[in-house]
Image (cartoon, grey):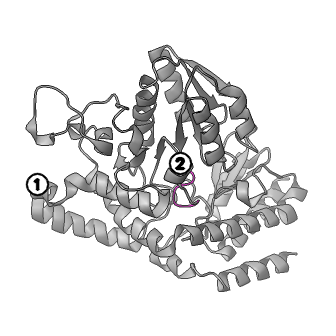
């Protein structure tokens, strides 16, 4: 079986139309990097762009860089991201802040736009930031949180949402891909159910942007937020992005009224007047230096195509599942991710008591997965930087360590 799996991985690499993209990344000392769902690897082009920006644009143009185009980067990069990865027409996406800050802005804007509704629906297994932000806003605004109990293996289902929403629901908030299990939610159907009840929808795209095709406009999404440091390879602490549907831009008002969201940024007037369109989502000075990597990453993703990325992602996670069944399940490891391709995001979670003890020996062996308490290893191969034989090699080392531990 070991030889069969290796032969399969080798054959997949030989037939991989995206294989050449691996050479565009900065070399790594890791022998198997399986944490692209947490932090993507840097591109060689990113290093060149950063050097050029520091020496040429920042060092050469100095403050004139703002009028050279920096001021518009949150919008121009947002439009590019929308076109390449989000299925969003221009004028609806901005790059700014962190996921946490944008979640606060968009949630507050949504619930304030529905003052006669006092309930927000969310699920118990969503990422902690999403839950914490909603708890804070609920306390701040006197709202009720309706919690959907979700199985970490399967995630939220449309039927659960239908049972939870009603005439008092202002907003529903879920993740497109569940951070723990990789469950891929049925966004379009959940949106239909929420809208029928008169509620707005807000989606967290952190674990899907750059890995799974997203169609915000087609699916009727109202608001969305996500990060750029996972499959979009933006680097540690890279800025987030926010999406506000065109038809809501005159109605919703985000609460952090900073000068960059003013209708006339340099007028410095006495009162706040929001800009039109998605620019009103901005608050403070954009993190221009941190946006530089996005130029290289969006160029690469546009060239590769998100559909091709998704095809390889499913092949990669399918290989993970087959290797886990063959090698790890007999050692007491449980797969806690969807097996159906249409319900699986870009990573697979493996669970066994004692996995935390294997982290250091895995790292010492050059294998880097992602660990989530209490006992889960997330295997997140990034399609543009990870080979099939790299997955095979990393999981073979995990198997050997798990055997020894057992």
- The picture quadrant where one finds residue 88 is bottom left
Q: Position of residue 196 (x, y in %)?
A: 61, 33
Q: Which residue is mark 2?
A: 205
What residue sits 51% from the left and 71% below the top?
305
Q: Is residue 57 left or right of residue 166?
A: left
Between disc 2 and disc 1, the foreground one is 2
Secondary element at tag 2 = loop
Badge 2, how many Cα within 10 Å: few under 14, some, many 20+? many
Mark 1, secondary structure of its residue: helix
What residue is rendered at 13% in x and 56% in y? 67
* Alpha-carbon span between mark 2 and mark 1: 34 Å
Mark earlier in primary sequence (2, 1): 1
Asked if the magenta segment contains residue 209, the reply would be yes
**Rendering coords of residue 61 (x, y %):** 11, 62
Instruction: In the rendered view, tell whether residue 119 sits above or below residue 101.
Output: above
> Can residue 179 be seen in the rendering of this structure?
no
Q: Is residue 404 visible?
A: yes
Residues drawn in magenta: 207-212
Query: Between residues 263 and 322, which one lies in front from this camera angle?
Result: 263
The residue that mark 1 highlights is 63
């Amino acid at each position: 079986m070991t030889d069969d799996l290796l032969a399969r991985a080798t054959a997949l690499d030989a037939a991989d139309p995206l294989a050449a993209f691996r050479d565009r990344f900065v070399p790594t000392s890791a022998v198997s990097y399986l944490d692209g769902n947490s932090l993507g690897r840097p591109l060689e082009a990113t290093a060149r762009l950063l050097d050029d920006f520091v020496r040429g644009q920042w060092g050469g143009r100095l403050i004139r860089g703002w009028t050279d185009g920096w001021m518009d980067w949150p919008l121009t990069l947002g439009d590019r991201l929308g076109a390449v990865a989000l299925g969003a027409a221009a004028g609806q996406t901005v790059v700014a802040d962190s996921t946490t800050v944008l979640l606060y802005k968009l949630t507050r804007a949504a619930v304030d736009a529905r003052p006669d509704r006092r309930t927000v629906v969310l699920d118990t297994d969503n990422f902690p930031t999403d839950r914490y932000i909603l708890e804070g806003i609920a306390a701040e605004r006197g709202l009720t949180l309706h919690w959907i109990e979700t199985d970490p293996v399967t995630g939220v289902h449309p039927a659960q949402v239908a049972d939870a929403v009603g005439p008092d629901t202002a907003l529903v908030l879920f993740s497109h891909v569940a951070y723990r299990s990789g469950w891929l939610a049925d966004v379009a159907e959940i949106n239909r159910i929420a809208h029928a009840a008169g509620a707005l929808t807000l989606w967290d795209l952190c674990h899907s942007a750059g890995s799974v095709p997203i169609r915000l406009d087609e699916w009727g999404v109202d608001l969305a937020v996500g990060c750029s440091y996972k499959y979009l390879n933006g680097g540690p602490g890279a800025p987030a992005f926010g999406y506000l549907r065109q038809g809501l831009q005159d109605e919703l008002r985000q609460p952090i009224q900073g000068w960059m969201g003013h209708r006339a940024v340099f007028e410095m007037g006495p009162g706040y007047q929001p800009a039109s369109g998605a620019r009103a989502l901005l608050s403070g000075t954009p993190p221009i230096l941190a946006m530089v990597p996005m130029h290289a990453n969006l160029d690469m993703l546009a060239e590769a195509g998100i559909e091709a990325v998704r095809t390889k992602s499913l092949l990669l996670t399918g290989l993970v599942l087959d290797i886990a069944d063959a090698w790890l399940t007999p050692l007491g490891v449980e797969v806690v991710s969807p097996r159906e391709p249409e319900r699986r995001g870009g990573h697979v979670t493996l669970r066994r008591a004692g996995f935390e003890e294997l982290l250091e020996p895995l790292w010492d062996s050059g294998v880097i997965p992602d660990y989530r308490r209490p006992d889960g290893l997330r295997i997140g191969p990034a399609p543009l930087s990870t080979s099939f034989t790299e997955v095979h090699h990393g999981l073979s080392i995990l198997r050997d360590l798990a055997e020894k531990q057992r």
